[in-house]
Image (tube, grey):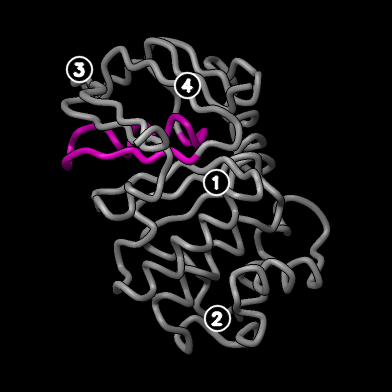
Amino acid sequence: MNIVELKDISVIYDQVAALQNVSLEVKEGEWLAIMGPSGSGKTTMMNIIGCLDRASKGSVIFDGEDISKASLKRLTTIRREKIGLIFQQFHLAPYLTALQNVALAQYYHSIVDEKEALKALDRVGLADRSEHLPKELSGGEQQRVCIARALINYPKLILADEPTGNLDEANEKIVMDIFKSLNDEGSSIIVVTHDQEVAKRAERVVVLEYGKIADRVDLAKK
């Protein structure tokens, strides 16, 4: 089964096409990388897949549901319940501890459970840093808190936008190893990246240029 299906998607802003007739299928449990130069449509595609925006034309199927004309309220619900978002900018509340930042995602979903939040931090190797504020954590540790926050509600899809863009090589490897473990456990992962080394960790790569898919590479067959 596919977790995401885009069918002839176009996104038009002020008469400029950010995406043009794009079709894409992502299977459950697949790790996909989306690449392309600045302005190619990567962020726009992420926003469509992540229920952050709606397409101007075409259809979007998420987890078997046609969400092409879904209300903003419904898109918010899907995003909250089924998608774990990870960004290049960490978006951590500076006055909350690592544990509280992770638990914050639960607040918008259900009852806050600190044990579950601590379990999520433990999955990314940060249980011993749970009471630290973001300013007391390294960049790599802050990104791992973001991953834990994305995992707390057991999402169907993990969607990451340049997740290693602010990390050094050592922390990039740690984060990619976490993604590999999650994917091995069956998580569906889509990573938007400009980094060839990050893209190589995926099973498949889609390259965007001028709002269109210019290339598709199946790394699993190499």
Q: Secondary structure at mark 3?
A: loop
Farthest front residue in view: 222
Q: Residue at x 28, y 55 (%)?
A: 197
The reply to whether the C-beta atoms of the residues labelled 2 and 1 are less than 8 Å apart is no
Of the image marks 1 and 4, the number of the one nearer the N terminus: 4
Amino acid under label 3? Gln
Asked whether residue 42 is drawn in magenta, I would say yes
Q: Which mark is residue 158?
A: 1
The reply to whether the C-beta atoms of the residues labelled 1 and 4 are less than 8 Å apart is no
Residue 61 is left or right of residue 162, and the answer is right
Of the image marks 1 and 3, the number of the one nearer the N terminus: 3
**Residue mark closest to the camera, 4 vs 2:** 4
Q: Secondary structure at mark 2?
A: loop
Q: Residue at x 72, y 58 (%)?
A: 106
**Residue mark closest to the camera, 4 vs 3:** 4
Q: Which residue is mark 4?
A: 25
Q: Which mark is residue 15?
A: 3
Q: Which residue is mark 2?
A: 95
Compute the Cα span from label 2 to label 3.
42 Å
Amino acid under label 1? Ile
Of the image marks 2 and 3, the number of the one nearer the N terminus: 3
Q: Position of residue 151 (x, y in %)?
A: 64, 56
- Residue 87 sits in quarter: bottom left
Compute the Cα span from label 4 to label 3.
27 Å
Amino acid under label 4? Glu
